[in-house]
Amino acid sequence: MIPPRYAPILFGLILSGLMSCMVSGIATLRATGLGEGVLTLWMGAWIASWAIAFPAVLLVAPLTRRLVAKLVRQG
């Protein structure tokens, strides 16, 4: 098992992986249609997207948490 101190990084890894997979899949299908080689194109787009999305999530998450805390009524 992974130590609890790595939970935010693991969360970012999983979230960015799933979101980039879905978004790149939709974008690839819209751009190329459902034809031969679409899966290969999608996987290439996904890996490139994930490489950007993971560090972006790690950088943006603390800002997002602070913004949400300001927008949500306490108590």
Image (cartoon, rainbow, N blue to C red):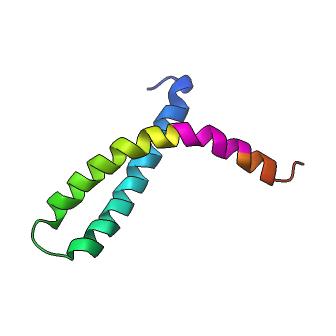
Tell me residue 64's x, y (percent). 65, 46
Extreme-left residue of the structure: 36
Is residue 13 something one can see in this rendering?
no
Q: Identify the residue at image location x=13%, y=75%.
A: 35
Picture quadrant where residue 8 is located: top right
- Say left or right for 34 vs 58: left
- Say left or right for 2 vs 68: left
Tell me residue 45's x, y (percent). 26, 55
Question: Which sits in the foreground, 14 or 23?
Answer: 23
Q: Is residue 37 above or below residue 58?
A: below
Point out the image quarter for the N terminus: top left
Tell me residue 28's x, y (percent). 27, 67
Tell me residue 36's x, y (percent). 9, 71
Asked if residue 64 lies in the magenta stretch, the reply is yes
Is residue 71 something one can see in this rendering?
yes
**How many dots with numbers?**
0
The residue range painted magenta reads: 59-66
Q: Is residue 25 above or below residue 30?
A: above
Asked if residue 9 lies in the magenta stretch, the reply is no
Q: Identify the residue at image location x=47%, y=48%.
A: 15
Q: Identify the residue at image location x=56%, y=24%.
A: 5
Question: Which sits in the foreground, 12 or 71?
Answer: 71
Picture quadrant where residue 65 is located: top right
- Say left or right for 16 vs 58: left
Q: Determine the main secondary structure of the stretch shown in magenta.
A: helix
- Say left or right for 59 vs 53: right
